[in-house]
Image (spheres, grey):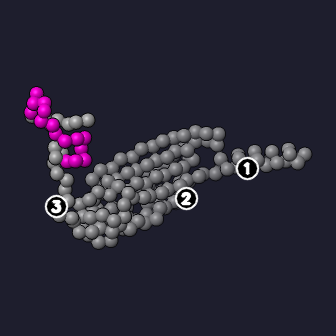
Amino acid sequence: MKAKFILCLIVFLLAASSAFCETTINSDVDKTTLSVGEELVFKVTVISSERQVSAPKIENFEGFVILSQAESSTVTFDQGGGKSMLVYVYVLTPVHEGTLKIKPVTITVKNKTYATEALSITVNPEIKNSKKPPVENNPDTLGPQTEEDDSDSSLPQYNL
């Protein structure tokens, strides 16, 4: 009798937990200190058991220029039901030095609002002469140019 009660309780708790909407929202950056002109990656991740989740509300990025943006979505199913994960990525660059704030991002699911924390970014003055050399002389590329094969001297040659 006791075992049957415990089994019923476990089944009830599993059923009840899948009935509630589980939603989380998180934001992060790849760095909190950079210089004017450098790139910052800002990412917002929304995970929800709800079938329909609208895009998050993102305020203006004051003090930043958006260089690019992308979004992706993934849906997974398990015994408890389905979950969707939405990821929004923004590549930003600051336009002036100082302490810049990225405001909280919000999302509303079933009349409940979820929000991230505000992020503080320290922007230093632009670093002069910090640009990498051209690709053919850049040690971060595949390898140095070789001059052994002159079959087509107009194309760069790389050692792999």
Alpha-carbon distance for marks 3 and 2? 49 Å
Residue drawn at (65%, 39%) of the image? 79
Q: Do the numbered discs 3 and 2 sit on residues whose CB atoms are within 8 Å?
A: no
In which quadrant will I find the C terminus? top left
Residue 76 in the image: x percent, y percent? Answer: 54, 40
Q: Residues within 10 Å of mark 3 (few under 14, many from 20)?
A: few
Type of amino acid at the residue the image marks with label 1: Leu
Front-lying residue, 98 or 147: 147
The label number, if any, that marks residue 112 in the structure image: 2
Residue drawn at (39%, 58%) of the image? 29
The label number, if any, that marks residue 13 in the structure image: 1
Type of amino acid at the residue the image marks with label 2: Lys
The label number, if any, that marks residue 129 in the structure image: 3
Q: Is residue 63 visible?
A: no
Please determine whether, in this image, residue 158 is positioned above or below residue 39. above
Q: Is residue 45 visible?
A: yes
| Figure disc tally | 3
Residue 41 in the image: x percent, y percent? Answer: 35, 55
Residue occupying the far right of the picture: 1
Please determine whether, in this image, residue 145 is positioned above or below residue 118. above
Picture quarter containing residue 80? top right
Residue 104 in the image: x percent, y percent? Answer: 43, 64
* Left or right of 76 in this view: 60: left
* Mark 3 vs mark 1: in front: 3
Alpha-carbon distance for marks 3 and 1? 62 Å
Q: Which residues are magenta?
A: 138-153
Give the mark nearest the N terminus, 1 or 2: 1
Query: Predominant secondary structure in magenta?
Result: loop
Residue drawn at (16%, 61%) of the image? 129
Q: Residues within 10 Å of mark 1 (few under 14, many from 20)?
A: few
* Left or right of 48 in this view: 30: left
Residue drawn at (16%, 46%) of the image? 137
